[in-house]
Image (spheres, helix red, strand yellow):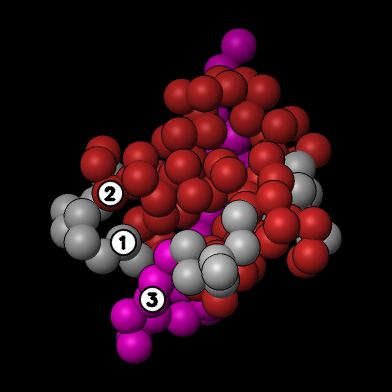
Amino acid sequence: MKKNLEQIAKEDSRYGISAIRFVYEGLGYTAKNVASEPKHVSGQTLCEGLRELAIEKWGRLALLVLNTWGLKTTNDFGEIVYLMIKHEWMSAQPNDSIDDFNNVYDFKTVFKDQFAF
């Protein structure tokens, strides 16, 4: 039987359930609103979708929320995606790699510096 997200979060312990749910929700958001090919979402495209979703949900608080959940770089998104692939909540194409999530953008730049006061 496939493990639920809570079990995966508890077992892995690097990221809490909120972070894992956010990335999972972000996949659907990205496929619907960002990706040009909704049947396959690349790592870079998912990172862009997660950026948009975080700003839409939390605005200026996005950096604080993500950091509180242990999400500090786009590499963390990749770690969660590949954890979910391992547990069959997501799938990957043969040419996909966890490296697709490496340094897609800087969290401080996109979640803090872009907001002008």
Where does residue 51 sit, x and y in percent of width and height?
48, 41
Q: Which mark is residue 93?
A: none
| Disc 2 element | helix
Distance from Cα at disc 3 to Cα at disc 2: 14 Å
Where does residue 77 sit, x and y in percent of width and height?
58, 58
Amino acid type, callout 2: Ala
| Disc 3 element | loop
Q: Is residue 70 left or right of residue 24?
A: right
Residue 72 in view: no
Amino acid type, callout 3: Ala
Q: Disc 1 vs disc 2: Cβ atoms closer than 8 Å?
A: yes
Q: Is residue 111 magenta?
A: yes
Locate the N terminus and report the quarter of the image it occupies: bottom right
Q: Return the residue at label 3.
A: 92
Residue at point 49%, 49% (across, down): 24
Amino acid type, callout 1: Val
Q: Which mark is residue 41?
A: 1
| Disc 1 element | loop
Distance from Cα at disc 3 to Cα at disc 1: 9 Å
What is the magenta range? 90-117
Distance from Cα at disc 1 to Cα at disc 2: 7 Å
Count neighbours of disc 1 (C-alpha within 10 A) and say few if under 14, some if 14 to 19, many if 20 or more.
many
Q: Return the residue at label 2.
A: 31
Residue at point 34%, 66% (across, down): 42
Locate the C terminus and report the quarter of the image it occupies: top right
Where does residue 28 sit, x and y in percent of width and height?
35, 45
Q: Considering only vertical position in the picture, is 97 above or below 71?
A: below
Q: Main secondary structure of the magenta part?
A: loop
Residue 83 in view: yes
